[in-house]
Image (cartoon, rainbow, N blue to C red):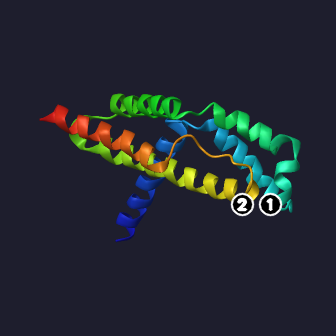
Amino acid sequence: REHKDTAEKVYRTNLSDYVNVKLGNPIDKISTFFSGVKVSLSSAVREEEIGFQINFSRSVLKAILKQYSLKEVRKSIEHTLNQIEKHLCPEEGLYELVSRTYCNGLLDQLAEYQDLLRRCYPDSGLSFEFREDEIRRVVENRLQQQGKGKE
């Protein structure tokens, strides 16, 4: 039982590392921005003051969000799914597992960033040009195509 738990832990760590490090992030500038927001919040800056810091102003966030249209995010996700497909053997069933892990990680990030956007920029009118269901649809469509290719 102990060996199985250890193996499971190593497996999950390696899967997480592969998804987070090797595949990259299709919304990297947004991630960098909100990582900085989280650091500021953890260093006693209040939520309502975040937008007044020069690095985290509403105009900086607006410029970053403009770079990530649905079309650009979809293209980046498709590129990442192509990488996954090239890296993995289709017979092992890992493509679906890694693709879903990647998608879930991205959706978790998006939910966290939407929460920070709501809390720190409440009346800004800013939002992402893409939604969770659109990201999920890109991945699900690819998985369906992948499944049809096997038949």
The disc, 2 or 1, on the residue closer to the chain's N-terminal end is 1
Residue 109 in the image: state x and y as whole percent.
57, 51
Marks 2 and 1 sit apart, C-alpha to C-alpha, by 6 Å
Residue at (37% x, 31% y) in the render: 87
Residue 16 left/right relative to 67: left
Q: Is residue 113 left or right of residue 14?
A: right
Residue 67's spot in the image, x, y percent?
Answer: 63, 30
- The amino acid beneath tag 1 is Glu
Vertical order, 128 against 7 (above or below)? above
Instruction: Looking at this view, name the residue that lies furthest to the left.
Output: 151
Q: Which mark is residue 147?
A: none
Q: Residues within 10 Å of mark 1 (few under 14, many from 20)?
A: some
Q: Amino acid at mark 2?
A: Arg
Q: Nearer the viewer, residue 4 or 43?
A: 43
Q: Quadrant of residue 69?
A: top right
- Tell me the quarter of the picture where residue 4 sits: bottom left
Residue sitting nearer the eye, 77 or 123: 123
Residue at the spot of label 2: 119
Do residues under tags 2 and 1 come within 8 Å of each other at their CB atoms? yes
Percent coordinates x, y for residue 83 in the rendering:
41, 29
Where is residue 140, by image quadrant?
Answer: top left
Q: Neighbour class for label 2 at 10 Å: few (<14), some, many (≥20)?
A: few
In percent of the image, x 48 and y 53: which residue is there? Answer: 13
Q: Position of residue 100 (x, y in %)?
A: 38, 48
In the displayed structure, 116 sits above or below 24; it is below
Q: Secondary structure at mark 1?
A: helix
Residue assigned mark 1? 47
Residue at point 45% right, 34% down? 77
Query: In what quadrant of the picture does the C terminus appear?
Result: top left
Say which residue appears at 72% left-offset and 33% top-offset. Answer: 63
Q: Which structural element holds mark 2?
A: helix
